[in-house]
Amino acid sequence: MIGKIKLVVVVLALFLSACGANVEDCLKDESCGPAIHVVNLDGSLPLDPYDPFWDSEPAAVKVELGPQMITNPKWPNPSTKEVTVRAVKNNDDIAIMLEWDDQTKSSNFDHSALYVDRAAVMFPVTAEKEAPSITMGEPGKPVNIWQWKAIGGERGQPGVKDNSNSRLAYQTIEDLNAEGYSTLTDQNKQDVDGGAVWKDNKWRLVLTRTLTNDNANDVQFKKSVLMATAVWNGSNKELNGQKGIAGWLLLMI
């Protein structure tokens, strides 16, 4: 009986230890990765995707995008195979930059096109819990999703001027939540901003938000967090689950 009690105590201790483990431990057990190191910056963050800063200080981490084969509609051969991720913060805000090759700019300004270029990053809302399913969370384990679409809309904002053709890249950026596939909901309060530019057959997208806020549905960047990312190529008729996706990365703060 004493042996059984000791065994229960050991198992419980391991369980509690795992629940309270530092999120960065996922690199050791290879349940996440690679790590995206967030650069610290004094002053304003560079919101222009082609600001020289993005090609100098932040480490450019290439992340492989794989097929989405977990839920229907499955997508075994996404056209976007890789995205480059960079990140920076100051005392108040964080900015994440995604860059990927795209030979065609698929955008629309009148809501008549379903197949437009899109990208998203996703975070667990509660960092202390075990990581939720990569398929947009699961019941009781919500995720916070920042999704960009190359389409005009009510919250569509003019992006940074593209000096190569003097056009503005318009976009819709949405602050969303989900607790599983097909549960995507739009937040009443939209806290995410950003802009995208298509140039030289590639997209560069910057997404930005305050490090912390009082929104219980938002991820809070008080320490390192898990992050996933996905890209949709409109010209390849990618939509919803039809996308290139990367599993949990570590946004190291």
Image (cartoon, rainbow, N blue to C red):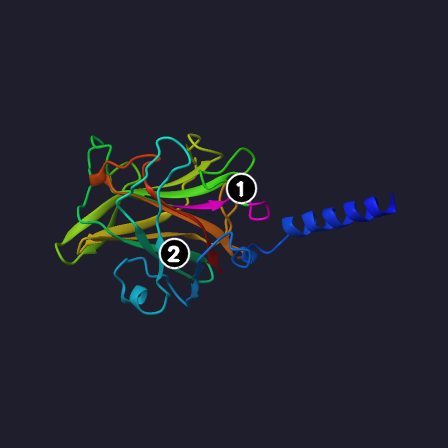
**Three-letter code, disc 2:** Ala
Relative to 206, residue 129 above or below? above
Residue drawn 31% across the image and 53% down it = 82
**Three-letter code, disc 1:** Ala
Sequence order check, earlier mark of 2 and 1: 2
Tag 2 residue = 95
Q: Label 1's element?
A: loop
Mark 1: few, some, or many residues within 10 Å (few <14, many ≥20)? few
In the depicted view, which residue is nearer to us: 59 or 217?
Answer: 59
Any mark on residue 216, and which?
1
Instruction: Give the spatial CA distance, label 2 vs label 1.
Output: 20 Å
Residue drawn 44% across the image and 32% down it = 181
Residue 77, percent across and down?
Answer: 29, 41
Mark 2: few, some, or many residues within 10 Å (few <14, many ≥20)? many
Q: Label 2's element?
A: strand
Residue 148, percent across and down?
Answer: 32, 43
Q: Give the magenta-colored segment's residue range.
A: 121-130
Residue 6, percent across and down?
Answer: 81, 49
Q: In this image, 21 relative to 222: left or right?
A: right
